[in-house]
Image: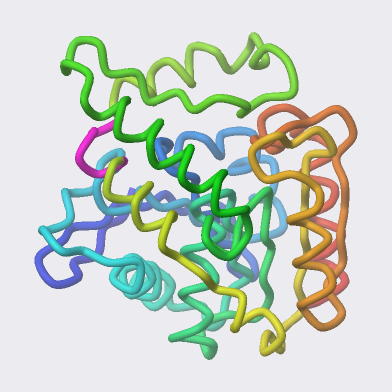
Amino acid sequence: MATVQVGGVEIAYDRVGQGPPLVLVHGGGYSARMWRPQLYALADEFTVVAWDEPGAGRSSDPPPGFTLTDYARCLAAVIEDVALGPARVLGLSWGGTVVLELYRHHPELVSALLLVDTYAGWKGSLPPEEVAARVEGARRMLAAPREEFDPTLPGLFAGEPPAEFVPLLDAMARDVRPESMGAQLLMMAEADERDLLPRIAVPTLLVWGELDARSPLDVARAFEEAIPDAELVLIPGAGHVSNLEAPERFNQAVRAFCRAHR
């Protein structure tokens, strides 16, 4: 584990392997541990970096008023701390929205984008009534007493979570900080990155679970249409967390894309 300080926030990240940098950005309610099937499997060819975002895992809490741009600034600091030059940056779900904000403000740090089951913000990808329903669900979740708080969002998996990862998912759920997750969900409700998509000028891979119910395939198709020369790979039988549901197929897609864009 390494750490970097940004404006009083301590950010922890894992770094394994050697080679060009591949930075993994987890979804909301998760931590670097969600990349267990990728971290060492891809380390034979890449320097794989997985952060705990501010407010998650081993990182410290963000201060009040922390914004999506602040998350992107912290991610930029991690890439600079790795000190291997521009990185291939992969973000899943909320993490993909953070990665887009990183590219908006720090394109010089990004050699390629890998966007997984993500959004151009909820406002930028979902109908207004769906956004309103998710915000209401988030408010109900956050209003529950701490002992009843359940950060598990509906529709994450195509079926039951993979049995081998259930202990990991349970451990991450126990570590979720309600204040951080609540702030992120409200940020997602307001985020709209659509204006950025046509201006992306680096190789871009879109990886989507074919059965993703949270970010359905019409969102993937909108990304594919908006981003110049984007490549879309569908993971059969997988839902929103495709890296855990089909890790071998997922790793294959990531490896093939990174090899093609050295």
Q: Nearer the viewer, residue 132 or 196?
A: 132
Q: Which of 123 and 111 is in front in this view?
A: 123
The boundaries of the magenta stretch are 176-181
- What residue is drawn where x is 25% and y is 41%? 58
**Vertical placement of residue 197 versus 120, above or below:** below
Q: In this view, does 28 lie to the left or right of 111?
A: left
Residue 123: x %, y % from top left: 52, 61
Name the image quarter holding the C terminus: bottom right
- Residue 9: name its quadrant: bottom left
- What residue is drawn where x is 86% and y is 27%? 237
Residue located farthest toward the front when viewing the structure as drawn: 129
Residue 229 in the magenta stretch? The answer is no
Q: Nearer the viewer, residue 160 or 182?
A: 182
- What residue is drawn where x is 61% and y is 75%? 194
What is the magenta segment's predominant secondary structure?
helix
**Vertical placement of residue 22 versus 134, above or below:** below
Q: Nearer the viewer, residue 208 or 203?
A: 208
Residue 125: x %, y % from top left: 63, 59
